[in-house]
Amino acid sequence: MKNIQLDANDFFANCAKNDTNKTTISGRYASDEGKESDITEFITSLLRFEQNNSFLDIGCGYGYLTDSLLALATENKLKTTLIDIPEILDKVKLDKNFAKGTTFIQGNFPDQLNKKVVGKFDHILIYSVLHYVLDPEKMIEEAVCLLNDGGRLLIGDIPNINKKGRFLASNTGRSFDATYKGIALDKAPKYKDADDFIEKNKKGLNLKVSDALITKIFNKYRQLGYNVYLIEQPASLPFSNTREDILIVKD
């Protein structure tokens, strides 16, 4: 059985060792270079960093987005903790763009960490990570447990397969797909609906990251007393047509 998490670890470790482009190392396309500033603005508008608060970035990655977030963390005097695989954290450390006192934790959250996450946090970010883990629900559950009162958890850039299917089954999505691939419209795949898209592409999809997961997370944490918001991405973000975000706030 394919292990999505191990494959992702190998992919990003290889990128960190052999790639020199800070956009592609982070898992985005080279053509998306420069969009990191839009992503940063979107993230910070939702996390709302405040002076002297604490910040946990789970699967922090390496690249321009990481640089921008660490600069903001320094500016706001945030007590910052970064979690990622060793190869990624080694690259971050070499750049020395982080404030003194930043904590680095190697491994995959919430398991296989080389040391425990200590304390609770005012701002927690899981960005473009959820589809690379074996148990998305457990990751979110463990992250929610680390929220301070008043804390904000952003689960960002979620590639919901149903959302992608709805988009690509639409006339707008099919036209976008043809343009993106540089092919004639009549050569672009045609899908009856989201289910048809999933059925025809399921070997390349993480079937756990779906409407069912989004709905379950939304309902679960609202019932537990959190404020939960499903958020549309701005059009300026690289994958805005097929991705969405969840914000969980602990009052």
Image: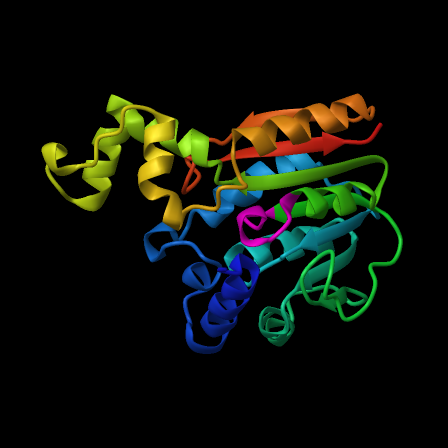
Residue drawn at point x = 69 percent, y = 53 percent: 57
Quarter assignment of residue 148: top right
Who is closer to the viewer here, 190 or 71? 190
Q: Is residue 241 left or right of residue 218?
A: left
Does the magenta-highlighted stretch encompass residue 41? no
The residue stretch that appears in magenta:
127-136
Q: Is residue 82 left or right of residue 234?
A: right
* 95 up-or-down from 78: above or below: below
Residue drawn at point x = 48 percent, y = 46 percent: 206
Q: Is residue 52 visible?
A: yes
- Expressed as whole percent of the image width and height from the top left, the position of residue 180 reads 24, 42
* 94 up-or-down from 8: above or below: below
- Expressed as whole percent of the image width and height from the top left, the position of residue 220 reads 73, 27
Q: Is residue 93 left or right of residue 170?
A: right
Quarter assignment of residue 240: top left
Does the magenta-highlighted stretch encompass residue 135? yes
- Expressed as whole percent of the image width and height from the top left, the position of residue 158 reads 53, 40
- Expressed as whole percent of the image width and height from the top left, the position of residue 160 reads 49, 36
Where does the C terminus fall, quadrant-wise? top right
Who is closer to the viewer here, 222 or 240? 222
Q: Is residue 241 visible?
A: no
Who is closer to the viewer here, 231 or 48? 231
* 36 up-or-down from 89: above or below: above
